[in-house]
Amino acid sequence: MIIKENSSKSNDYEPIAKGRHEAICVTIAGIGEQETSYGVKNQVIVTWEIPSIVREWTKDGETQEGRAQISRTFTCSLAPKASLRLLLESWRDREFTQEELQGFDLKKLLGVSCTLKIKHQTSADGSKIYANIADVEPYEGQGQLEPEATPVIYDPYNHDPEAFSKLPDWIAGKVEAPTSAGLEADVEEIEEIPF
């Protein structure tokens, strides 16, 4: 899975440098059921803001500036080998208990600081380099990081027009009409995160 910066023109940017970057979670966006190589899966996009990297872009003919963002898409699952579970266990620096596996609220991630480990991946034709989130580790910096972007959480199964309007176009474009229960996960969903 290729993870791109949170911009419709992310390919115009230099990729975020490899290595570790302090970051803060600013978006949890359910995108509903999506076709994947493993069939249709309920998915969520998590976006982090990196305070140490500032980008410029043009929107509606005006130059704007802001912190770099990077996102990753996950299947809403806490199954033992699920990417979301592995990432959360790394971020929390501990495994889930059986009680925690009964339910975990993803919105607990919003506003939480961490350290992202970024790796690079070259496109098949060699023309592009993508920055990917390899891991998320506990934040060890001084003081809590404060986001520049307005944190947003969106659940397509409980549509909130105001939250939806705050999503970047590239995420909003992925949201489809719901076909089953929301951002709750079976034993593979999330409810309490001890940070």
Image (cartoon, helix red, strand yellow):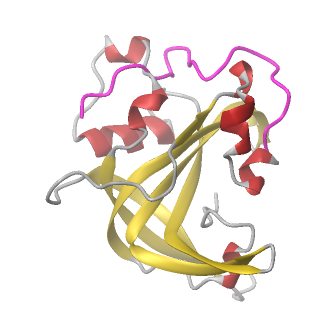
- Tell me where residue 87 appears, x and y as whole percent: 40, 44
Asked if residue 31 can be seen in this view, the reply is no
Image-based side of 137 in relation to 131, left or right: left
Image-based side of 62 in relation to 53, left or right: right
The residue nearer to you, when weighing 86 against 161, is: 161
- Tell me where residue 159 appears, x and y as whole percent: 73, 24
Tell me what residue is drawn at x 30 percent, y 25 percent: 96
Quick one: quadrant of the C terminus? top left
Q: Is residue 177 magenta?
A: yes
What residue occupies the far front of the structure in this picture?
A: 62
Q: Is residue 178 magenta?
A: yes
Number of callouts:
0
- Tell me where residue 182 appears, x and y as whole percent: 66, 19
Quick one: quadrant of the N terminus? bottom right
Tell me what residue is drawn at x 50 percent, y 70 percent: 68
Q: What predominant SS class does the magenta segment belong to?
A: loop
Asked if residue 28 can be seen in this view, the reply is yes
The residue nearer to you, when weighing 81 against 9, is: 9
- Tell me where residue 119 appears, x and y as whole percent: 45, 72
Which quadrant would residue 49 be assigned to in this image?
Answer: bottom left
Range of the magenta residues? 174-195
Which quadrant would residue 4 be assigned to in this image?
Answer: bottom right
Tell me what residue is drawn at x 39 percent, y 30 percent: 108
- Residue 160 versus residue 170 in the image, above or below: above
- Residue 65 versus residue 135 in the image, above or below: below
Tell me what residue is drawn at x 68 percent, y 47 percent: 167
- Residue 20 versus residue 13 in the image, above or below: above
